[in-house]
Amino acid sequence: MPSRRLSDKIIDAHTVACEEGKREIAKLLLDALEIDLSAMGGINTEHREWSEAMEGAFSLHEKTFGDIHSE
């Protein structure tokens, strides 16, 4: 089943940006992901699943481009 939430689509786009070596776009997508996370709030199943996906996006970014804090 295709992803329907905006956050899923941002994570998918971030993965493509990393695969294509587009560092600046990947960083902007992570910023968008953080904004979306801050809008979610609360501790529920969806939030926990989303947090795991977000952690995966940050890990991929660091693996592909190095330390995110140096940008």
Image (cartoon, rainbow, N blue to C red):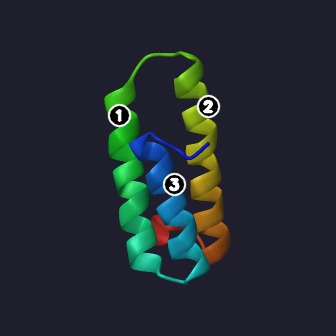
Q: Are there few (<14), some (14-19), or many (20+) residues within 10 Å of tag 1?
A: few
Q: Which residue is mark 1?
A: 38
Residue 62, quarter of picture: bottom right
Q: Which residue is mark 3?
A: 11
Residue name at image x 31 percent, y 31 percent: 39
Left or right side of 6 for 49: right
Instruction: Tell me how far mark 1 sits from mark 2, CA to CA.
Output: 15 Å
The amino acid type, in three-letter code, at marker 2 is Glu
Instruction: Tell me how far mark 3 sits from mark 1, CA to CA.
Output: 15 Å
SS at mark 3?
A: helix
Q: Which percent across, then down, holds residue 1? A: 62, 42
Q: Which percent across, then down, holds residue 56? A: 64, 51
Q: Please tell me which residue lies in front, 67 or 63.
A: 63
Q: Is residue 57 above or below residue 22?
A: above
Residue name at image x 44 percent, y 39 percent: 5
Left or right side of 30 for 55: right
Q: Does label 3 or label 1 sit earlier along the sequence? A: 3
Residue 28, quarter of picture: bottom left
Q: Which percent across, then down, holds residue 23? A: 47, 78
Q: Are there few (<14), some (14-19), or many (20+) residues within 10 Å of tag 3?
A: many
Contact (CB < 8 A) between labels 1 and 2? Answer: no
Dot in front, 3 or 1: 3
Residue 49, quarter of picture: top right
Tally the numbered discs.
3
Residue name at image x 59 percent, y 27 percent: 48
Q: Is residue 20 above or below residue 68?
A: below
Q: Which residue is mark 2?
A: 49
The amino acid type, in three-letter code, at marker 3 is Ile
SS at mark 2?
A: helix
Q: Is residue 69 above or below residue 47?
A: below
